Image: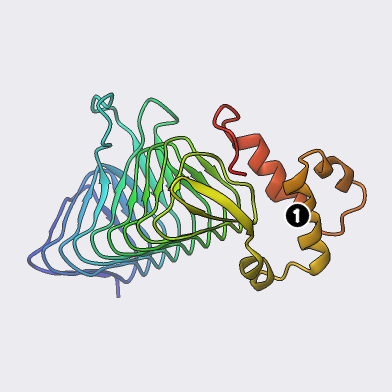
Amino acid sequence: MTHQIHKTSEVSSKVKIGKNVKIGPFCFIDGNIQIGDNTVIISHSNLFGNIKIGNSNKIYPFTNIGCDPQDLKYEGEDSYLIIGNNNLIRENVTISKGTKGDDMVTKIGDRNLFMTGTHVAHDCILGNNNILANQATLAGHVKIFDNVIIGGLSAILQFITIGSYTMIGGMSGIDKNILPGSLVMGNRAKLRGLNLVGLRRNNFTNQDIREIQEIHKDENYLNKLRNKSSNNEILKIFDDFFNTQNKKIGIIK
């Protein structure tokens, strides 16, 4: 089986479609688009422009993927959206492509869940295994690492970096960077402690958690761990965070 396209959908001849792809009714798909194997687009979805979609994604009705950035500086430049594998993109999600104000690309990794009504703005970079609950919104240039949960109706300011294994409570306003392993909540959000549930679910030991807590207290503690920590994942997630964050924004404390 190659692929199935419902007769009511309009798919440009430029679109490259993988094996066993299913495109349901009333979809509009136009541009330099690649759709990977086993991806399902249920119905009533719009995909525009330069998009590369990996394998085994499921896109629910009334989504807009690769739409123009909601940025007044955007002048129609030929920018991109890249989506990895095994993502779930639920109803009414919008994901914009990049702009010349950054690297011209919005990137999404693997195994992410975008619940109903979430928005990923231009130039955002998301890693793997993240969950954006209903109506969570990312402004432009936001960087999210891995295993992050963002509660419903939360809003993330432009250029924010969110470290791995973070939990953001619902209806939060995020205006500063967030260290890996944090639990934050509020408008504007404050640090409420470590995301102990998330860390333990991901097999961090009590010793690992104590080390993460010490880094939260004193960033210089990270250097002390380089020769003694038994968990290289801790070093990696904090090094990645500190090397990526916009230091002018500051960190939620």
Could you classify mark 1 by the number of other residues whose Cα lies within 10 Å: few (under 14), some (14-19), or many (20 or more)?
A: some
Q: Quadrant of the N terminus?
A: bottom left
Q: Residue at x 25, y 26 (%)?
A: 72
Q: Is residue 129 visible?
A: yes
Q: Is residue 182 visible?
A: no
Q: Which of the pair 224/174 is nearer the observer?
A: 174
Q: Which of the pair 176/15 is nearer the observer?
A: 176
- Image check: 49 left or right of 171? left
Q: Which of the pair 78/236 is nearer the observer?
A: 236
- Image check: 170 left or right of 240? left
Q: Is residue 200 above or below residue 223?
A: below
Q: Position of residue 79 (x, y in %)?
A: 33, 34
- Image check: 34 left or right of 7? right
Q: Is residue 71 above or below residue 61?
A: above
Q: Secondary structure at mark 1?
A: helix
Which residue has dot 1 on it? 213
Q: Position of residue 128 (x, y in %)?
A: 53, 58
Q: Quadrant of residue 141?
A: top left
Name which residue type carries label 1. Gln
Q: Position of residue 88 (x, y in %)?
A: 38, 66
Q: Residue furthest right?
A: 227
Q: Residue at x 26, y 67 (%)?
A: 60
Q: Position of residue 52 (x, y in %)?
A: 37, 49
Display coloring: rainbow
Q: Residue at x 8, y 68 (%)?
A: 7
Q: Quadrant of the C terminus?
A: top right
Report the number of numbered marks: 1
- Image check: 193 left or right of 222? left
Q: Residue furthest left?
A: 8
